[in-house]
Image: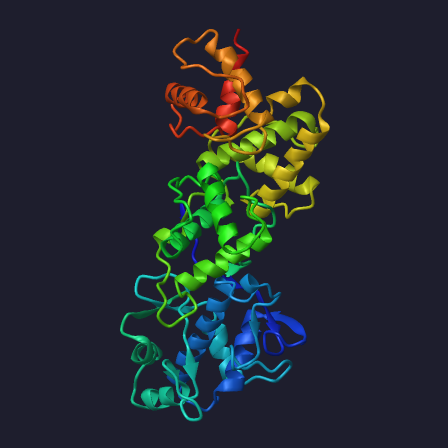
């Protein structure tokens, strides 16, 4: 498991106007943006600790907007505006002050957190002379710095004694909509994020059915919860999460938890803990490693450019060799480290194999979606036929009806097989169990 802490972005897209103004969007580096705002809002002659406190507030406000996808979840194609009424002052192409730039370079990947929360705190602030607010006073911070208070003490004076700084946050690409429709049978961190958000939204909208699974599998419970959410918020009722549903879920989740508010409910480490690592490298183990090996092996069986090497549940030298060959062939950075971008491409290539193969071999291939209680269709029929072959010689298996419905009988048989094979008894058919069942079905 991995805690997905907020990531400091490399760049930020700024709308040069109020949200609904017909204005230009510009994309600048995150550090340039912070230096620009700081140079536009505060004075370089202020005490160093005052400057740092204000820059921490600017960074955290910005990170809050990006992390919660505040504007993108409302359908806008930018991260923040340059309107002080809504956000912060940003003057495109203005010059910035050297001492402010130096402080920004030093602390740009540190942000403010409150209590036990890990999300960037909504550090509301105002100048303290022309306007006052329930937050940091920029001019007031000067007086406190002159009294000898540190930047953290200044922040705690305005935001509370449970304020802290998260230092040295990761810098990279922020993670939002995964770029594909998440649906029945999908798995991974995007599913976990949807399920987590819907469980919290349900507290405010109890008509949404509960989701009990914590395995990151998009099951029938998730389908029903998504359908009710879509019905409540006037979206097409499909049970799948496309871009519009994804961002609506994000917007409602942010709203009910008040994540863009001084009185935020906050996000705990447990809420940001995901089953799947964002990248896999030498020595990593687990089910996601086995999944990658399964897909690579199937592709390598048909593609001579990908070496077919022996693999197991450990990401080893063979894994790196196969991943590098795959990355090279499909125009990805050739690192041998497996990332989400590689995962998306791997599944795309695998699905092309499923579509283009028209022989008996394709029936043995895993269909690229998890099967569980309630699943229906031809993929279930294929699995049930393999299961039936096993039942003919292993009478300890409860049995199966080849009806295309993953019913209770199929579920009980899957649980028995998982117990016999030493796999997690969760009733879910993934690529590892699928391969085992295909192999067992061909014994007699």
What sort of colour scheme is used for the picture?
rainbow
* Quarter of the image that includes the N terminus: top left
Spot the residue most to the bottom. 129
Between residue 187 and residue 409, name the one nearer to us.
Answer: 409
In percent of width and height, residue 87 lies at: 51, 77
Residue found at x 42% / y 43%: 275
Q: Position of residue 280 (x, y in %)?
A: 50, 43
Q: Is residue 119 above or below residue 126?
A: above
Residue 176 in sight here: no
In the rendered view, tell whether residue 198 sits above or below residue 19. Answer: above
Task: Report the number of numbered marks.
Answer: 0
Q: x and y percent of residue 346 in the render? A: 62, 38
The residue that appears at 38% across and 29% down in the rendered structure is 424
As drawn, which residue projects farthest toward the left? Answer: 161
Indicate left or right for 224 with 344 as reference.
Answer: left
Q: Is 181 on the left-hand or right-hand side of 146?
A: right
- Residue at 72% of width from left, 29% of height from top? 356
Q: Is residue 342 visible?
A: yes
Q: Is residue 214 above or below residue 78?
A: above
Looking at the picture, does residue 110 appear above or below residue 442?
A: below
């Amino acid at each position: 498991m991995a805690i997905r802490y907020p990531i400091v972005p490399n760049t930020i897209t700024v709308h040069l106007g109020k949200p609904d103004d017909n204005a230009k969007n510009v994309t600048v580096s995150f550090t340039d943006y912070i230096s620009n705002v700081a140079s536009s809002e505060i004075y370089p002659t202020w005490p160093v600790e005052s400057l740092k406190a204000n820059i921490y507030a600017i960074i955290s406000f910005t990170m809050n907007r990006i992390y919660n996808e505040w504007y993108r979840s409302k359908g806008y194609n930018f991260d923040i505006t340059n309107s002080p009424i809504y956000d912060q002052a940003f003057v495109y192409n203005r010059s910035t002050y050297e001492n402010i730039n130096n402080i920004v370079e030093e602390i740009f990947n540190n942000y403010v957190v409150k209590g036990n929360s890990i999300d960037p705190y909504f550090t509301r602030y105002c100048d303290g002379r022309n306007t006052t607010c329930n937050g940091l006073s920029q001019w007031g911070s000067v007086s406190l710095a002159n009294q000898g208070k540190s930047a953290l003490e200044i922040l705690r004076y305005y935001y509370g004694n449970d304020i802290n700084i998260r230092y040295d946050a990761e810098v990279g690409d922020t993670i939002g909509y995964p770029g594909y429709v998440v649906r029945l049978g999908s798995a991974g961190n995007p599913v976990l994020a949807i399920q987590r958000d819907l469980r919290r939204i349900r507290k405010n909208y109890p008509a949404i059915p509960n989701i009990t699974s914590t395995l990151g599998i998009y099951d029938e419970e998730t389908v029903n919860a998504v359908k009710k959410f879509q019905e409540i918020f006037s979206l097409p009722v499909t049970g799948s999460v496309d871009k519009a549903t994804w961002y609506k879920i994000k917007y409602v989740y942010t709203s009910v938890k008040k994540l863009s508010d001084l009185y935020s409910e906050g996000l705990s480490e447990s809420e940001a803990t995901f089953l799947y690592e964002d990248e896999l490298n030498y020595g990593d183990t687990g089910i996601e490693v086995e999944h990658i090996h399964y897909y690579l092996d199937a592709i390598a069986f048909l593609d001579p450019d990908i070496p077919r090497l022996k693999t197991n549940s450990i990401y080893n030298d063979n894994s790196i060799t196969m991943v590098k060959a795959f990355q090279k062939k499909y125009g990805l950075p050739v690192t041998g480290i497996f990332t989400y971008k590689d995962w998306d491409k791997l599944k795309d290539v695998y699905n092309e194999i499923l579509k283009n193969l028209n022989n008996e071999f394709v029936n043995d291939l895993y269909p690229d979606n998890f099967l569980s209680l309630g699943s229906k269709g031809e993929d279930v029929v294929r699995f049930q036929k393999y299961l039936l072959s096993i039942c003919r010689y292993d009478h300890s298996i409860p049995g199966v009806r080849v009806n295309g419905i993953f019913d209770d009988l199929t579920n009980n048989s899957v649980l028995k097989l998982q117990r016999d094979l030493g796999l997690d008894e969760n009733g879910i058919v993934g690529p590892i169990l699928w391969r085992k069942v295909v192999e067992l079905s061909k014994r007699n």
